[in-house]
Image: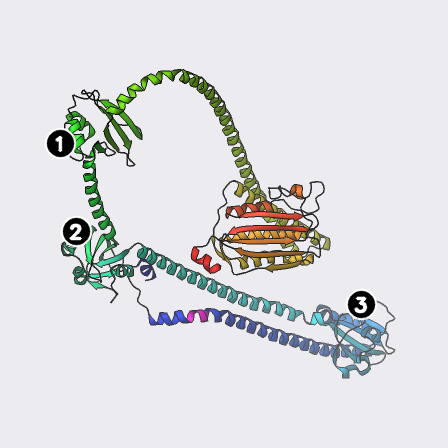
Amino acid sequence: MRARTILGVARSVRNPLHSRFEALEPSVRALLPAVVVAFILTLCLGALVQNTAMRDDALETATRDIDVLSALIAAELDAASRVEKSAEIALAALAARYISKQGRIVHVSAADGHIVASEPVIGRTQRTLVDILGPTQPLTVFGERAGVMRITPPGGPDMLASVRNLAAPLGQVAVMQPVSRALGVWHERRRGLAVLFGAAGLALGATTIAFMLQARRARAADEDCDRVRERIDTALNRGHCGLWDWDLARGQIYWSDSMYAMLGYDRAGDFMSFGEVSAFIHPDDADFYALADAISRGEADHLDQEFRVRDAAGEWVWLKARAELVTDRRTRSQHLVGIAVDISEQRRMAERTATADARLRDAVEAISEAFVLWDSEQRLVLCNAKYQQLHQLPPELLQAGISHDEVMALSAQPSMDREPRLMTGACGSYEARLSDGRWLQINGRRTKDGGSVSVGTDITKLKQQEERLTQSEHQLLLHVTDLKASRQKLEAQAQQLADLAERYLEQKAAAVSANRAKSEFLANMSHELRTPLNAIIGFSEIMENGLFGSLGCDKYLDYVRDIRSSGGYLLGVINDILDMSRIESGRMRLEKSEVAIGLVVDEAMRKISDESDRKQLTLTMEGPRDVAIHADPHALYQILGNLLDNAVKFTPEGGSVALRVRQVPGALNIFVEDTGIGIPKDKIDRIGRPFEQVEGDLTRSYKGSGLGLAIARSLVELHGGSLRLRSAIGAGTIVMVHLPLGLPTSKLAQAA
């Protein structure tokens, strides 16, 4: 239905449900991201709560296990003491099942507190249980009454510990387990939970982004359709024409809005009946009933006819209708679809032309000279009675369209010394002598359509005077001889100039060929270099971010950063060379659109913000921000970015860089000022050429390819503007970019 609306063939019927959804669509599209974000936050909160609960459960389970294990080990050690079995042997029997696998540590002390056995075995030591557990803990004092406590031993990680009193000669047994080992199962479950919730959030976010992109694409498609429809309607209204669709089976005829506007009628409905349309048409011009009958019998499949239609004011308007018979793909019904153009003005012009032709014939007959006009095929268009008398031709034979050869064959001119000939150049003049002594001068000229016109004039008196001047002509022969000698000398000089011009063209062609070869070489080399540079930059970013693991040494990380920085700098230089080669070869094409200068200025200022902050520069922007200019946004950003980048690069720390926008009639002036090192006067004219630098090759302290200002100047000139420089050593530089607004007159008035 939208496509048919754009073509103007039918009107869409608005569905109330669709209208309500279209009204709610912006709110739904704006609310959906907030709902998704809230849901993801809820997921994250739930994951955090569950993770905390699992951690508490893991610590509680480990605490119970240590409490039970300490009681078990104390009972085993008391039993071993009663049968006089050493504590080391008793611990070794329990180590494989309860101690070593869980990372637990057991220390057994004598009655005096010194360690007599440990698992894992640590050998003989003079340390006491208090030294191992720490003097601030209450476990050794209260024993099993203290339960299981979380302590931090001297020089060790957090531990879960429990102490039990033993029968003599043993003193106490301490069972410890690192908190990290106790939380091992919790760590595994936490990773699984993070993967689960992360995957769900990622899937939901990706789905939401896809929905937003699809909604944006649909909205852009709707805007494109509306724009096309408006353009078609504008074109039809400006062209004084309209679209119409005749449904032959139903007898319904659709007129576009431009058709109603052209005839001055108001639309009463979507369709008109066959009888209503026939009532508007002049009965002497078209018979649509006969046309419909011929189409139904298959005798006609198109319409190309001029007829009159009565407009709303009661006047007859001439229309030229052209239509083609088409078959609807869905209903298989036949439609006569076409266009109607208002040709009333052409009709009036044709009538005025016929009147002018009649006046022209009367004027031609009134002149005293013989007049004749031939068309591009040398056929007669118009002649007067004087021409007929000269050629002694009967009036009935001189009909429009007769060829020149036929006229000459029928012509009887015994009094003419020679036949008048047809001119071959753009214009010409020749003379004919009659046998009675009269002379005729026949002047001819080629017409713009390839024909010719001739006028014969009596010049007898002029010829008599010419004879009297013949004697004077002989006196001029001597002067003519001198002029010939001078002409020969001039011809020799002209030949020399021609040789020089030919050599110049050859040298120019060679230079153009060399310049083209240079541009193609730079473009090819830039393309070949950019491919490995993209890999170098990409892989160095992966290594710097540690995507697949740490590099193992901080020095390597510094090297990777240097590689990425150098690769990015080299890629920028290659891009500048490629842009310069495209500009020089004439392959740079601007895609202009209406853009606000403030947006481009903000983007360019944002590009240099990091470097300016590093050098502690003062950045300022003055002037209007809402001025619209018709330019290529990317090229305009590149111009301002290159100028600001140069200003920041050549301005020492603590300096200032200012960008000022000034609107002048029909144009925009952009000033970039800095307090940098400045440019010497002897180099100010060379700055802006490709690869030109302020510093010499041996004294360069600022890196750069020297193409930034050259690219900016070239892009400004492609926009029809100009770039000027003013600079002083040690005082700074001012660059002025003059760009025409390039907007229609109405928009220029609004901008002013």
For label 1, the residue is 397
What SS does tag 2 mark? Answer: loop
Closer to the camera: disc 2 or disc 3? 2
Indicate left or right for 278 with 564 as reference: left
Q: Which residues are magenta?
A: 24-28
Membership of 26 in magenta stretch:
yes
Membership of 637 in magenta stretch:
no
Give the distance between the C-alpha atoms of the residues marked 2 and 3, in whole angstroms. 110 Å
For label 3, the residue is 121
For label 2, the residue is 298
Instruction: Give percent across and percent down for residue 647.
Output: 64, 52
Q: Residues within 10 Å of mark 1 (few under 14, many from 20)?
A: few
- Relative depth, front residue between 580 and 567: 580
Instruction: Give percent across and percent down for residue 13.
Output: 30, 67
Instruction: Give percent across and percent down for residue 399.
Output: 15, 34
Q: Residues within 10 Å of mark 2 (few under 14, many from 20)?
A: few
Give the distance between the C-alpha atoms of the residues marked 1 and 3, in whole angstroms. 140 Å
Indicate left or right for 506 with 320 as reference: right
Name above or below for residue 400 compared with residue 238: above
Q: Which amino acid lies under the numbered mark 3 shown in the image of this protein?
A: Val
Q: Residue 642: tell me if it is visible.
A: no
- Relative depth, front residue between 706 and 428: 428
Closer to the camera: disc 1 or disc 3? 1
Q: Residues within 10 Å of mark 3 (few under 14, many from 20)?
A: few
Name above or below for residue 69 compared with residue 706: below
Residue 103 disc label = none
